Image (spheres, rainbow, N blue to C red):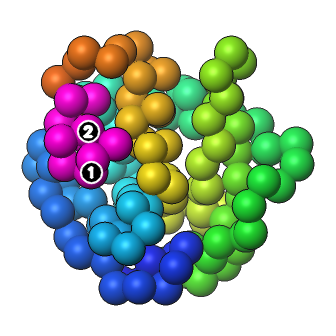
Amino acid sequence: MNCTSCDEPMIVLEVNEVEVDYCLECGGIWLDSGELGILLGDESKVKHVLKEAIPAPKKTETYRKCPICLKKMEEIEIGKDKKIFIDRCRNSHGLWFDRGELRNFAEFMDHGEGSKVVKLLKEMFGE
């Protein structure tokens, strides 16, 4: 799979029994549908947060295409105090995280700076 951001080849890593597509060039991460909940250990809470997400009011980046269906993804906004913007496939194929966004999302999900998941993400991806 090529990166949806910089078009470089991505590598597949296994993190907590979840396959993570990672771009060595830009640090982007693609997670197939459902993998975020498994990775963070709380599928129902992740589904709820993603369902409550709203479309970003103003596009902050260029539009990205889903690496599965090649359709334009939508940028969504999560959080009130510290806003997190991620790209979501409109056909529910998965989520795209730019460098640091997955860690920010994990912290938002009450994992906090010192959680195992956040520490693992920092170690693996240098965030």
- Looking at the rendering, the stretch of residues picked out in magenta corresponds to 118-127
Is 126 inside the magenta-drawn segment? yes
Q: In which quarter of the image is residue 69?
A: bottom right
The residue that appears at 49% across and 43% down in the rendered structure is 101
Left or right of 40? Residue 64 is right
Q: Where is residue 58 in the image (x, y as percent from the top left)?
A: 88, 48
Task: Classify residue 102 by image quadrant.
Answer: top left
Q: Name the residue under label 2.
A: 122
Q: In this view, does 12 lie above or below 54?
A: below
Task: Name which residue lies at 88% across and 42% down.
Answer: 57
Pinpoint residue 121: horizontal percent, then vertical percent. Answer: 25, 40
Q: Is mark 2 on a helix, strand or loop?
A: helix
Quadrant where the N terminus lies? bottom left
Task: Name the residue located 27 percent from the left edge and 29 percent from the top edge.
Answer: 118
Q: In this view, does 41 lie to the left or right of 43?
A: left
| Disc 2 to disc 1: CB gap under 8 Å | yes
Alpha carbons under labels 2 and 1: distance apart: 5 Å
- On screen, residue 52 above or below 14: above
- The answer to whether residue 44 is above or below residue 125 is above
Q: Can residue 38 be seen in this view?
A: no
Residue 76 appears in the rendering = yes
Label annotation for residue 125: 1
Amino acid identity at mark 2:
Lys
How would you rate the neighbour count of disc 2 (Cα within 10 Å): few for under 14, some for 14-19, many for 20 or more? some
Three-letter code for the amino acid on which mark 1 is drawn:
Phe
